[in-house]
Image (tube, rainbow, N blue to C red):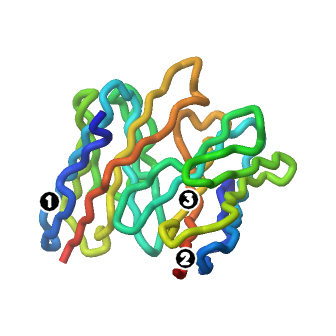
Amino acid sequence: DAGVIQSPRHEVTEMGQEVTLRCKPISGHNSLFWYRQTMMRGLELLIYFNNNVPIDDSGMPEDRFSAKMPNASFSTLKIQPSEPRDSAVYFCASSFLAGGALAKNIQYFGAGTRLSVL
Amino acid sequence: AQSVSQHNHHVILSEAASLELGCNYSYGGTVNLFWYVQYPGQHLQLLLKYFSGDPLVKGIKGFEAEFIKSKFSFNLRKPSVQWSDTAEYFCAVRAPNAGNMLTFGGGTRLMVKP
């Protein structure tokens, strides 16, 4: 299995530009998570999806951030417009949520996208 | 607020020293517990997990963790660390009724001096 695949690995952009981060979860997984990691705030959950439906987006910092999951094999996290304080590493993770086996699912993380907003 | 606490933010050890990283949580009821490791410049990888049964859990690379329900703790241990264990370690908890969500602690940065 290729694991969770994120692209790009690195993104450098200027303030005000639109940024789109992409994630392909592990095949067969039905839950997908977006996290942000910074030195100041550590690892924060931004949003997560079950069966392509957003379940909890309370961690999304503000309206500039949006996430979509049009199908089971693809998700995007968009920042528009981007600001220097958005600079961070963004991780995507996926897991398999089964009704009777909630306790067994494990989150697998992608390699992350390092975003720098100048 | 319900939370996961890792009290040691930075730990520096010499090779062959013993390691114990603390993790405490504040959720009642049945929880699932995890330790993830993040090597420099890499993504988070699962080190070990506890769902039920024996409270002493063995993980990869010689790590183990002990679930002590009465203390709401899940401390990570390794009897003899190596330079290659230099990494950041995250404790995570799946709380009751949290669905598929994990709550992560703030992480502990471990540096092992050769």
| Residue behind mark 1 | A18
- Residue B39: image x %, image y %? 43, 64
Q: Secondary structure at mark 1?
A: loop
Looking at the picture, tell me which residue is in the foreground, A59 or B14.
Answer: B14
Badge nearest the viewer, 2 or 3: 2
| Residue behind mark 3 | B90
Residue in the picture at 43% in, 54% down: B44
Badge nearest the viewer, 3 or 1: 3
| Residue behind mark 2 | B112
Disc 1 marks a residue whose amino acid type is Glu
Residue farthest to the top, as pictured: A100
Looking at the picture, tell me which residue is in the foreground, B77 or B89.
Answer: B77
Quarter of the image with the C terminus of chain A in it: bottom left
Residue in the picture at 64% in, 34% down: B97
Residue B95 in sight in this render: no
Residue in the picture at 81% in, 49% down: B68
- Image position of B34 (left or right of A12): right
The residues tagged by marks 2 and 1 sit, at their Cα atoms, a distance apart of: 40 Å
Q: Please tell me how crowded label 3 is: few (under 14), some (14-19), or many (20+) other residues with Cα within 10 Å.
A: many
The residues tagged by marks 2 and 3 sit, at their Cα atoms, a distance apart of: 17 Å
Residue B107 in sight in this render: yes
